[in-house]
Image (spheres, rainbow, N blue to C red):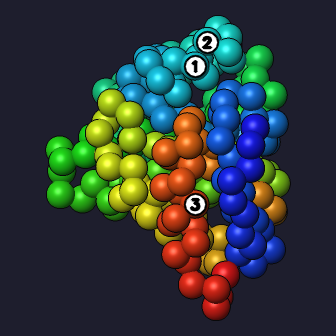
């Protein structure tokens, strides 16, 4: 993985990397899931393939018990990491851009709720993809601003044991969008 940016926020650091999220050694990785929780394309499919059948089985149990109608946008659900290096997978359903007026609030909610899970589990690190920027058509620059903004706000409010929040971006274009958003955070209070 290639590091493309880093910024301290209180006791934690936000780290930007270009690479493959499924290879991240963070305590938890965040899956850009669909509401069905049963795998799909992009990041979701890659996590399910590399993580193996345990993740799919746990997702089926979650659907049968907690989310029979599917996981709504802005919400998260947690499974083990299966065969991944990460111990946990936080499945976050981002909004489809333009399908609702509150798409920024729903995208921010994905990040806030995933960070809340990390705090509840006492994790030191968590890694995010660029949620909703693939088939859900969220413009990359806007998504980066929302994701970085929500993450900074949460780390300033209560980092828990988190010491590193990574954004593992698939390509140079996404990495630059997130680097630009991270540079835009004012130095005071960071």
| Disc 2 target residue | 49
Rendering coords of residue 54 (x, y %): 67, 13
The residue shown at (17%, 44%) is 99
Q: Secondary structure at mark 3?
A: helix
The local crowd at label 1, few if under 14, some if 14 to 19, many if 20 or more residues have their Cα within 10 Å, is: some
Q: Residue furthest top?
A: 53
Rendering coords of residue 140 (x, y %): 39, 50
Can residue 176 be seen at all in this image of the molecule?
yes
The residue shown at (38%, 23%) is 36
Q: Residue furthest bottom?
A: 188
| Disc 3 target residue | 179
The local crowd at label 2, few if under 14, some if 14 to 19, many if 20 or more residues have their Cα within 10 Å, is: some
Using the image as rendered, state which of residue 75 and residue 26 is in the foreground: 26
Using the image as rendered, state which of residue 166 and residue 141 is in the foreground: 141
The residue shown at (50%, 46%) is 174
Q: Which quarter of the rendering shows the N terminus?
A: top right
Kindly report the distance in space between the C-alpha atoms of the residues bearing marks 3 and 2.
Answer: 29 Å
Q: Are marks 2 and 1 in contact (CB under 8 Å)?
A: yes
Rendering coords of residue 38 (x, y %): 46, 17
| Disc 1 target residue | 46
Tell me: residue 55, above or below residue 7. above
């Amino acid at each position: 993985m290639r590091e493309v940016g880093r910024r301290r926020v209180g006791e934690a650091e936000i780290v930007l990397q270009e690479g493959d999220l499924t290879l991240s050694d963070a305590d938890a990785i965040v899956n850009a899931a669909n509401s069905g929780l049963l795998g799909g394309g992009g990041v979701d499919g890659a996590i399910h393939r590399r993580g193996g059948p345990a993740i799919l089985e746990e997702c089926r149990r979650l659907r049968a018990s907690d989310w029979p109608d599917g996981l709504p946008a802005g919400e998260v659900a947690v499974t083990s990491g299966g065969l991944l290096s990460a111990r946990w997978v936080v499945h976050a359903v981002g909004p489809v851009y333009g399908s609702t007026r509150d798409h920024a609030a729903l995208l921010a909610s994905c990040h806030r709720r995933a960070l809340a899970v990390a705090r509840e589990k006492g994790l030191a690190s968590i890694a995010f993809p660029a949620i909703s920027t693939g088939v859900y058509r969220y413009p990359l620059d806007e998504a980066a601003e929302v994701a970085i903004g929500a993450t900074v706000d949460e780390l300033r409010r209560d980092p828990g044991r988190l010491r590193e929040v990574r954004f593992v971006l698939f390509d140079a274009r996404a990495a630059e969008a997130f680097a630009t958003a991270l540079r835009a955070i004012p130095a005071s209070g960071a």
